[in-house]
Amino acid sequence: MCFLRKWDIMSYNAKADENYRKKCKTIGLKFTLNELDFYENIVKHCKSNNLSLQGYIKELIKKDLDEKGIQYND
């Protein structure tokens, strides 16, 4: 017997997806050739701890802001 999840049967709406992406904000990180070891250490840490790079970096930033007493909206 096959059970379908809600997202398996939902139709894709390109316009809604585009509108959603326009509301999202992005920060990019670039690691130079001199920083490749640092980058590899981050990737290795995330893989060995089953973390996403995005989640790990966001958590580090959140922790830093909290320690500095910088307020933000969740």
Image (cartoon, rainbow, N blue to C red):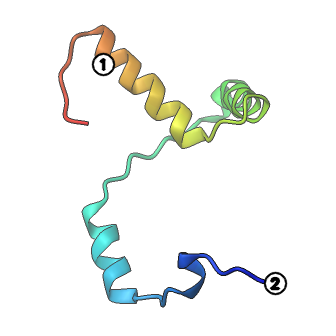
Q: Quadrant of residue 1?
A: bottom right
Quadrant including the C terminus: top left
The residue lying toward the viewer, choosing from 20 and 39, is 20
Considering only vertical position in the picture, is 1 above or below 35? below
Label annotation for residue 65: 1
Q: Residue at x 55, y 32 (%)?
A: 56
Residue 55 drawn at (x, y percent): 52, 38
Residue 52 drawn at (x, y percent): 62, 41
Considering only vertical position in the picture, is 17 above or below 25? below
Q: Secondary structure at mark 2?
A: loop
Please tell me how many numbered marks the rendered image carries. 2
Q: Amino acid at mark 2?
A: Met
Q: Secondary structure at mark 1?
A: helix
Residue 65 drawn at (x, y percent): 30, 19
Q: Residue at x 31, y 70 (%)?
A: 20
Asked if residue 11 lies left or right of residue 13, the reply is right
Considering only vertical position in the picture, is 49 above or below 53? above
Q: Earlier in the sequence, mark 2 or mark 1?
A: 2
Asked if residue 36 lies left or right of residue 54, the reply is right
Q: Amino acid at mark 1?
A: Leu
**Residue identified by numbered label 2:** 1
